[in-house]
Structures are given as structure tokens and as C-alpha cells.
Amino acid sequence: MNVWVGEGLAAQEVYTLIQLFNPIYSKIDSDHDPSNRYVLILGLLVFMLALLGIASRPMGSLACVWPANAFLLGAMIRQPLLRTPRAWLVACVSMVLADLITSSPFLIATVLSVGNLVGVYAALYVLERLPQKAHEWDQRHGVLLMIFAALVASMSAGFVGLFAYPLLFDGTAVKGYIFWSVTEFVNFIAFLPVVLSAPVFGQLWKQLKRPRRITLRSSQWMPAVLVFLLCTVTLFLEGPAKLILPIIALLWCAFSYTVFSTALLTLFFCFWTLVTLALGLDNAAGEASNWNTLMSWRVGISLIALVPIIVACYNSARKEEMESLKWSALHDALTGALNRKGLEEYHQSLAHSRSNYPLGLLMLDLDHFKSVNDQYGHSAGDKVLKAFVKNMQSHLRQEDVVARLGGEEFIVLLPQCSESAVAEIAQRIKESLRAETITLDDDQVIQVTVSIGCAYSIKGEESLSSLLCNADQALYVAKDAGRNQVVSFEASNQ
């Protein structure tokens, strides 16, 4: 929360502030603690966002948008390493410096910057004492935590307005509290969801570097285009339609996009509406009327912005639940391998996506696995099964899949693989498992072996049941030959 007051820049004040800043950044630069890098980045981003907020405020008025506080709160929620006295000091100095270089007096800039931190600190103080952690906000209960944090932060920051508003605007303390609280609330609602839902930079960079062909369907870009179109239309509207019209497109975005994408588009709506509102009120007559109208509009903007965010969060949670249920229906709970139904669906997907492709299948059975359960217990048997699946997957390609048919019997499906490569993979799995030792919970070490039957289809014309039958016959021969063997179906018929 900042105000454009004062004329001229006191060089001595800036010099004093820089002198205060230098030891902080020198310490950060010379220390190898990763948290210090976060503090440095935090200070630079707060400074830039403070300048953005200052650029949005008309002369003699508060900023139309002020993203620095919401960013600071979101960053400290997501990265606990930032919750240090040094980070608070760097954030405060960054805000003060941004004000000083835009001609605000040193004392007022300092008081208002400290006031900015009051709301952020109050929200963090409350969130840290709640049983549900705020970083899980993207779930259904989490969006309520985000709203609660915005309320606590804005109402706490309102106490600054009790003193600052009468001092700077010759208004009443009550108006000052309302002005500060409402303005802060709409800023938190607009910017906080973007910060909290933003992807981790490292993961985002990996996705961007990954070569892929991007094709956008109309269903993917139309919701975003409609947001920009309807926001433009609001320039020619007056009254409630200015707020209500874009919500149609924002709700479409909430059902079509991720929480982060929806939050970005909602932020655009808030920024657009706040700026156009401020420009329109500048030309309106009646100071009291302007104040009441501004408060009403800002409350309306914040409430409208909540709708697509809430819908997007609930939709995201519903999709995660559906994905979890689908995964459980197609996978083995113990090992994470596909179950019989998952194997059949994967085979069907191969048949639909490709034609005349070679397909290899391995049927694997752990030798004397019942004795492991009998001698060491079922928990040891479970550990052996999980270790076996992990061992197998280390020898497979991305398109190869492992499935558990039941007990100690597994299937490996190898699409687009030559017959010699199928046998080679089977041999590698067998030798690798024989060489591996498995340490149980009581520190006992055991070794297991596996028998493998191989089946192969040159053009993928055989059904899955036919391949399973062939591999099962080969597996029977491998067991009959003394176990710990790899036998192909052709060899079993010779």
C-alpha cells in the first residue's frame, strides 16, 4: 500500500539506504547458503513489483494494483527458508528504495513499507498455527485457506490506514481502515493464486527444453481469447455489466485450464478492471461519491475474481481424484505395475495406434517364492516383489510395460522390439536379479532367481491371450529345466 507524495529525491536518504543494503547483499554474495540466494532474488522481485505498483497509482492517490505484498506472502508460504529476519529486512528495504527513487519522502516511504509487511506477517503467523498447511492450497480445502490468508493480511494491513489515511489524505480513521483493507484484499485475491499455483521454475524449464510438436485446438485457445475479447468490450459498458460479462469466459477457463493458467487470466481481468476503473473515476465528479464507488467496485472485483479460482481448484481436485481412481483400477497396489485389466488396455491401445508392428512378451515367475513367504514372512515377500519390479524396469525402455498377473507371476510387454532383443532383455533381467541381494527389515540378506518364458509376434497379429498362452508354455519348459532359465516359445516346441 503506497501513496505518491512529496517532491524531489533526497540523495542523502538514498545513500543511507544503500549503505544499509550493501552489508546485506555482501553477506548474501559471499555465503554459499542456498537460502541467501533466495533472499537476494526475493529482494529484487519485490523491488520490481513495487515499482510496478507505483507506476499504477495516479498522482495523490493509492496504487491501483500493488502486487509486492501478495508475492511476498506467496513466496514465504512456498519457501519456508525465506522466513528469516534477513529476508524481512531485504523486502522492507526493497520497498523503501522503490519509493525513494520515485520521489517519496524517506519517512513516509519507510512507514508505508513497514505497513506493507504487517499484513504479510499477520497472515503467515496465523497460517503457521493452523493444522492444515497452506502450501496444499490447491486442494478443495486449500483455496479456503488462501481466502482466509487474504482476509487476515488485508484486515491487519487496514490498521495502518487508521493512522496513514488521516495523515496523508485528511480523511477519517474509519475510512482509512476500510480503504486499506479493501484495496489490500483485492490485490491479494488477484496476485496470491498466481504465486501459489506457479510451477517450479526447474520443472517448467525442463518442459520448455523438451522438444515436442505443439498443436492447439480451438477448445484450448478459445477460452483465453474470449477473456481478452470480453474485457475489451467492457471499455464500452457502464455499471455491473463491466464486472459480470468477463466472468463467463473466466468460468470457461476454470473448466478448461490448470489452476495456474486460470489464475493468470483472472489476474489480467483484475488488473484491467482496476486500471480502467481508476482512469474512469479520475474524470468523475464528487469526491465522496468517488470514494464509495471505488470501494464498492473493488469489493466486487475481488469477489468476482474468487469465482473462477474456486471453480478451478475444485475442478483440479476432481481431476486428481479421477486420475487416482483410474490409476488404482489399472495398477497393482503393491508394486505399481499394471494389473490384468491395465495390460489388456495397453495392448488394445497398441493395436489401435500401430499396425504390423513386432511385439514381444515375457512371462516371469519368481523361483520358489512360496518358501520366501514361509521362511521370512509375507512382509519380506512383498519387499522382494517390489525390488523385482524395480529391477525389471531398470532394463526396459519407456514404451515397455510391466504387469502383475497375480502372486509372483509378471508380464513384460515389449512393442517394436526384435526377437533377438526380446531374448537379450530377458537374459539381462535374469542375470541382474540373480546378482542382486535384497536386504530385509531385520537386515537379513536374501537372493532370488526368476524363470522366464518368451513369446514373439512378428506383425503383432496374435491376440494377447494367444501370446500369454505361448509364453506360459515356454515358462513351463524353463521351470521343468531347473528354473532360473530363459526359454522362447519356438525353443519349447523343438
Image (tube, rainbow, N blue to C red):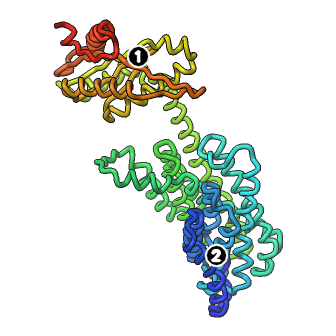
In percent of width and height, residue 61 lies at 66, 77
Q: Nearer the viewer, residue 452 or 434?
A: 434
- Secondary structure of residue under mark 1: strand
The tag on residue 95 is 2
Residue at numbered disc 1? 366
Q: Earlier in the sequence, mark 2 or mark 1?
A: 2
For the residue pair 442 and 262, the one nearer the viewer reads as 442
Classify 57 as above or below 222. below
- The residue at 65%/91% (across/down) is 7
How far across and how far down the image is residue 9, in percent? 62, 91
The amino acid on which the numbered mark 1 sits, given as a three-letter code, is: Leu
Q: Is residue 54 visible?
A: no
- Asked if the residues shown at circle 2 and circle 1 are in contact, with their CB atoms under 8 angstroms apart, the answer is no
- The residue located at (56%, 74%) in the rendering is 30
Q: Is residue 110 left or right of residue 138?
A: right
Say what amino acid the circle numbered 2 marks.
Met
Specify the quadrant that holds the N terminus: bottom right
Q: Secondary structure at mark 2?
A: helix
